[in-house]
Image (tube, rainbow, N blue to C red):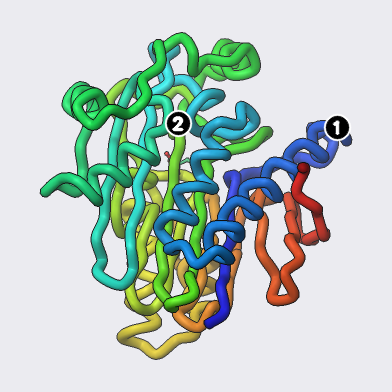
Amino acid sequence: MTIAFAVHGGAGHLSRAGLSAARRQEIHEGLAEATAAGRDVLAAGGSALDAVVAAVVLLEECTHFNAGRGAVLNADGHAEHDASVMRGHDRAAGAVGAVVGVRNPIRLAQSILLQTEHVLMVGEGASRLADELGLERADPSWFIVPRRHRQWQRTQAISLDHDTTGTVGAVARDRRGRLAAATSTGGMTNKLPGRVGDSACIGAGTWADGHCAVSATGHGERFIEANVAARIANLIELSGLSLEAACARVVHQELRGDGGVIAVAADGVPSLPFNSGGMLRGILAEDGQIYTGIWDELVPTPAPT
Ligand code: ASP
């Protein structure tokens, strides 16, 4: 069976003038590297779940993106992370909200899926669970990079990461035809401490079942209200829409906020629509080539070695 894989690095009104050629290059490379990581897991016969987590860990580790180290800061000037992961064949899910000091929130979400009776853990309890599970912790100051601190200082309102790179996510179909989706974020700049967005909400920011796998990025409150990711799956299952038609309807007609999704259908066909100026994304094409994009066009991009 054909493997399929895609990643995103956030959606927003990314201005061409605001991104230097060097930074564009680094973004393309980061997306290609994460796409290659997922591809390698799948090509070796690994599971869709392991593939999406491998890619998201890389994106969390890359300070260009709004996840892990380099995440945006809340109104108190701290990084609080949301992350979630879902496996399609049995609809098992794991998620964390408003967690502080866990180096790779997506690993904690995966551990919640694999090792606990729960789906969603938040705040201090989630951090304690990370310790009990032996996951790596980091001092809260480690997550704050100078670019985010400057962004936080000049931003008065709650805002999407409009002019730079954002939330991360991945969707996959493995050789057994099983699907998975993962999403990880620092949320929105200046969010209230304790605010949890769609990236922690199974159904809104992340969904996988037998029909499709979806990871979303955009104004989280609007994505929760529209239950975006599960809504796409429901339109396929109950209304007989193709993945492309279901994604287009939700992203371009129903959603009342900026953003987009990456999705892959049960047959491996992808769809990556967005209603904002841009969405950072990477995709493994059928011929094995990796393509990445910021605005409308996708360009072939070798992963850095
Ligand atoms: N959806 C994320 C949130 O609202 C933000 C983003 O995708 O950039 O927390």
Residue 44 drawn at (x, y percent): 55, 63
* 156 up-or-down from 184: above or below: above
Please tell me whether mark 1 sits on a helix, a strand or a loop: helix
Q: Quick check: can you spot residue 274?
A: no
Calculate the distance from the C-alpha at mark 2 to the C-alpha at mark 1.
Answer: 24 Å
* 199 up-or-down from 202: above or below: above
In depth, the one of 157 and 73 nearer the eye is 73
Q: Earlier in the sequence, mark 2 or mark 1?
A: 1
Residue 39 drawn at (x, y percent): 60, 60
**Local crowd at mark 2 within 10 Å, few (<14), some, or many (≥20)?**
many
The residue most toward the front is: 44
- Kind of residue at disc 1: Ala
Report if the beta carbon of the residue with label 1 is closer than 8 angstroms to ligand 1.
no
* 258 up-or-down from 68: above or below: below
- Kind of residue at disc 2: Gly
Numbered mark located on residue 22 in the image = 1
For the point 35% across and 47% down, which residue is it? 84
Q: Is residue 89 left or right of residue 259?
A: left
In depth, the one of 24 and 50 nearer the eye is 50
For the point 43% across and 20% down, which residue is it? 79
Circle 2 is placed at which residue position?
Answer: 186
Report if the beta carbon of the residue with label 2 is closer than 8 angstroms to ligand 1.
yes
Residue 9 drawn at (x, y percent): 60, 45
